[in-house]
Image (tube, rainbow, N blue to C red):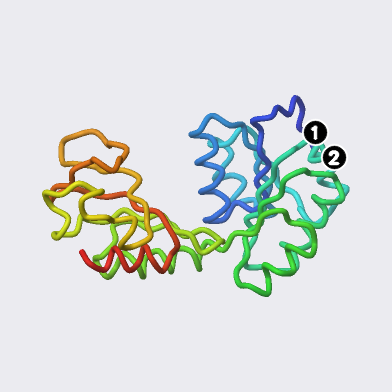
Amino acid sequence: MARQRNVSDSTVLVVGLGRFGSAVANSLIRMGHEVLGVDEDPALVQRMSDRLTQVVQADSTDTEALRQLGVADFERAVVGIGGDVEASVLTVLSLVELGVGNIWAKATNERHGRILESTGAHHVVYPEARMGERVAHMVTGKMIDYIEFDDDYAIVKTRAPAVLAGLTLAEYGVRSRFGVTVVGVKRPKEDFTYARPETPVQKEDLLIVSGPTALVEKFAAIT
């Protein structure tokens, strides 16, 4: 196995090149980062070989194999293994033992996530659950996009309520009535505008709204 050399601050290790891992790796490449991809499946390694900086077929649960790849030099790693819980946990444990500073790991459920956290993962993500919540909010037609954070805080893109048309944010009292903040306004064929109390709202506008999840949902419901 060839040792990964010249690891820079922008280099990220991605272990597991299935749908989630490959999506993360491809996005990192588009953002200008270098990516070392690792997977045990030769077909996945071959598929990603011309897309990433370097791709290696290896058993990520084998600490010594990862050591030989120079994984100890990496500051950031993403573990995209989801279907095999044991492999996911052992991979995180190997990365912790090698001193990787920031480890993001995919979890398929809460129990899996708790195990990953206790093993040493610094960040646990639940892509299926998050996407399910996102689709549920958007399918109602009340929200165009939806992102919820771990501390019960959300940012959404929603259509401007009809009752707000022709008024400024201050005149309608969005913040005092609903406890949310309109961050920005996007008008058809115009650039995005950061919202201020005196910002007027028109019927066709799209609003970027932030605040506690329940309050943001309540505001979006009046559209």
Looking at numbered disc 1 in the image, what kind of residue is underneath it?
Arg
Looking at numbered disc 2 in the image, what kind of residue is underneath it?
Gln
Q: Position of residue 170 (x, y in %)?
A: 25, 48
Quadrant (top left, top right, bottom left, bottom right) of the N terminus = top right
218 to 153, vertically: above or below: below
According to the image, label 1 marks what residue?
3
Q: Secondary structure at mark 2?
A: helix
Give left or right: position of 202 versus 116. Answer: left
Q: Residue placed farthest to the top in the image?
A: 6
Residue at 34 percent across and 55 percent down: it is 175
Which of the marked residues, 2 or 1, is nearer the chain's N terminus? 1
- Say whether marks 2 and 1 touch (CB < 8 Å): yes
Q: Secondary structure at mark 1?
A: loop
Q: Nearer the viewer, residue 102 or 213?
A: 213
Q: CA distance from mark 2 to mark 1?
A: 6 Å
According to the image, label 2 marks what residue?
68
Residue at 63 percent across and 65 percent down: it is 107
Give left or right: position of 101 versus 185. Answer: right
Residue at 51 percent across and 48 percent down: it is 23
Q: Which mark is residue 196?
A: none
